[in-house]
Image (cartoon, grey):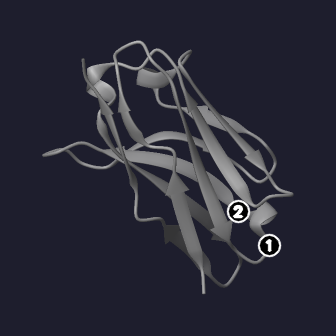
Amino acid sequence: QVQLVESGGGLVRPGGSLRLSCAASLTFFNSYSMGWYRQAPGKQRELVADITSGGSINYADFVKGRFTVSRDNAKDTVYLQMNSLKPEDTAVYYCNAFRATLQYRYNYWGRGTQVTVAS
């Protein structure tokens, strides 16, 4: 059974840092693109950052220079280091795993972890 389990969320003051982790139970984890998305109340889910199986990284403009995504294929885990957090970063953060073959598309989501930035 595929599972993506996020951890590391919480309450932090503006300017603070958090490190999110997503532990995956996936066959061929290293062949998946892994992404972090977020959804704030009343807003659509949006991409924060993703990292491909080859290590290419993409960031949303609103986190460039503040957040860093990384993966450890030996641990089947993807991370999101979040620095200089702002109140507008408050959201539920979701881990995503995506893989496409000639025949199938695999797309999995975690349940999310709450990040609240407030003084």
- What numbered label is drawn on residue 71? none
Q: From the top left corner, tell me how far across and down residue 50 is, in percent.
A: 59, 44
Q: Nearer the viewer, residue 97 or 100?
A: 97
Q: From the top left corner, tell me how far across and down residue 93 is, in percent.
A: 40, 47
Give the residue displayed 67% in from the left and 85% down from the top. 103
Residue hosting label 2: 32
Tell me: 18 left or right of 68: left
- For badge 1, the amino acid type reads Phe
Residue 113 to residue 65: above or below: below
Tell me: 59 left or right of 45: right
Give the residue displayed 74% in from the left and 39% down from the top. 56
Residue 78 to residue 10: above or below: below
Residue 5, by quadrant, is: bottom right
Q: Nearer the viewer, residue 81 or 38?
A: 81
Residue 57 to residue 114: above or below: above
- For badge 2, the amino acid type reads Tyr
Tell me: 112 left or right of 106: left
Q: From the top left corner, tell me how far across and down residue 26 is, in percent.
A: 70, 74
- What numbered label is drawn on residue 28? 1
Q: Quadrant of the N terminus?
A: bottom right
Q: From the top left corner, tell me how far across and down residue 104 is, in percent.
A: 63, 82
Q: Residues within 10 Å of mark 2 (few under 14, many from 20)?
A: many
Which residue is farthest left? 42
Q: Nearer the viewer, residue 32 or 82?
A: 82
Q: Are marks 2 and 1 in contact (CB under 8 Å)?
A: yes
Q: Nearer the viewer, residue 8 or 44?
A: 8
Which residue is farthest right? 74
Rounded to the nearest angstrom, the CA distance separating label 2 from label 1 is 7 Å
Residue 55, by quadrant, is: top right
Give the residue displayed 75% in from the left and 66% down from the top. 29
